[in-house]
Image: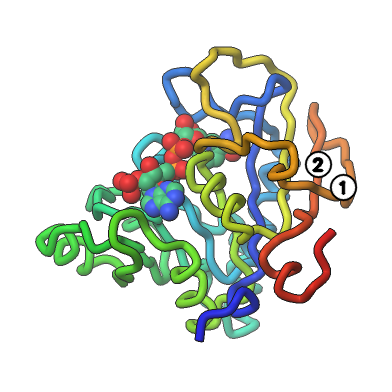
Amino acid sequence: MMTANKRPFVFINMAMSADGKVSTVRREQLRISGTEDFERVDSLRASSDAIMVGIGTVLTDNPSLTVKSDKRREERLKSGLPENPIRVVVDSAARTPIDADILNRGAGKRIIAVSERAIVEDIGRLGEKADIMVCGEDKVNLEKLLYLLWCQGVNRLMVEGGGTLNWSLLSLGLVDEIYIYIGNMIIGGDSAPTPVGGTGFVKPDELLRLALINVEELDEGVLLRWRVLNTMRERYNGTTG
Ligand SMILES: NC(=O)c1ccc[n+]([C@@H]2O[C@H](COP(=O)([O-])OP(=O)(O)OC[C@H]3O[C@@H](n4cnc5c(N)ncnc54)[C@H](OP(=O)(O)O)[C@@H]3O)[C@@H](O)[C@H]2O)c1
């Protein structure tokens, strides 16, 4: 049986500008943080069992999501882990390009989570480079996906965006912590994406409440770590904040 407890610990890591944008109106990838933050993100990746992104991020940024430091990859191997965490793309229609870096750079397992609307040819094509998980009819059923990942031994899942995927996970109560780096720049633009998109909460009592874990000055910006209150896990345990 699927229960709220049978899922990994899930945290989102994103970088945004001082005005709260994660990229430009053209949705092009942007370097928002510096070298200290780069090392922090690499270390978070190395500490995770899997890293997840939405197909929107794969199509715009083409990330490889590998652990960049040789030392960190060696340490993972020494502790009996694969050198890179499992890389997971949430991609209902199996649109991940076959030459995407996530499928071709670095060793390790990849999972493309699709829905029943993905066509067999695309599944077959991607199946040569990744494991395919079919979850959900139209969009990927994220609760089911997290349960299936947990069944595969994923205890710690890092989510690296984008805002559409973040919204779904947050609004379903599937996120435990959020780490947001705020960089020293203004991006602007009404349609420039933010860390959380989607339809948004409307009523004040629907809002997701956060508890501040800590604040750290890093490079020329600030890192905020938040714990998400009233997640499904807390509701399940009866400890809603
Ligand atoms: N600064 C940062 O830290 C950072 C990090 C990551 C991304 N970004 C930026 O964010 C932008 C991309 O974000 P995005 O919001 O467009 O895309 P996204 O969140 O990466 O991917 C969203 C897509 O995932 C698929 N999906 C499947 N099932 C879903 C579900 N249940 N819930 C939500 N999505 C589901 C949908 O496409 P299908 O219907 O086709 O499946 C959806 O359009 C880019 O501009 C990128 O540069 C910034």
Q: Judging from the image, what secondary structure is the residue with disc 2 in?
A: strand
Q: For residue 76, which numbered disc appears in the image? A: none
Q: Position of residue 58 (x, y in %)?
A: 38, 44
Disc 2 C-beta below 8 A from ligand 1? no
Q: Amino acid at mark 2?
A: Leu
Q: Taking the image as drawn, is residue 148 in sight?
A: yes
Total numbered circles = 2
Within-10-Å neighbours for mark 1: few <14, some 14–19, many 20+: few
Q: Earlier in the sequence, mark 2 or mark 1?
A: 1
Mark 2–mark 1 contact, CB under 8 Å? yes
User: Residue visible at 82% across and 34% down?
Assistant: 222
Q: Is residue 57 visible?
A: no
Residue 57 position by quadrant: top left
Question: Is 166 above or below relative to 107?
Answer: above
Q: Nearer the viewer, residue 101 or 174?
A: 174
Image quarter for ligand 1: top left
Q: Taking 98 as reference, is 22 above or below it?
A: above
Which residue sits at x=61%, y=51%? 170
Instruction: Determine if the C-beta at disc 1 is less than 8 A from ligand 1.
Output: no
Query: Badge 2 is on which residue?
Result: 224
Residue marked by disc 1: 212
Quadrant of the image occupied by residue 136: bottom left
Q: Secondary structure at mark 1?
A: strand
- The quarter of the picture where the C terminus appears is bottom right
User: Which image quadrant is residue 3 in?
Assistant: bottom right
- Residue 29, percent across and down? 48, 30
Q: Is residue 226 left or right of residue 98?
A: right
Q: Residue at x 30, y 61 (%)?
A: 114
Q: Could you say where residue 138 lies in the image, as x and y percent from the top left?
A: 29, 55
Kind of residue sitting beneath label 1: Leu
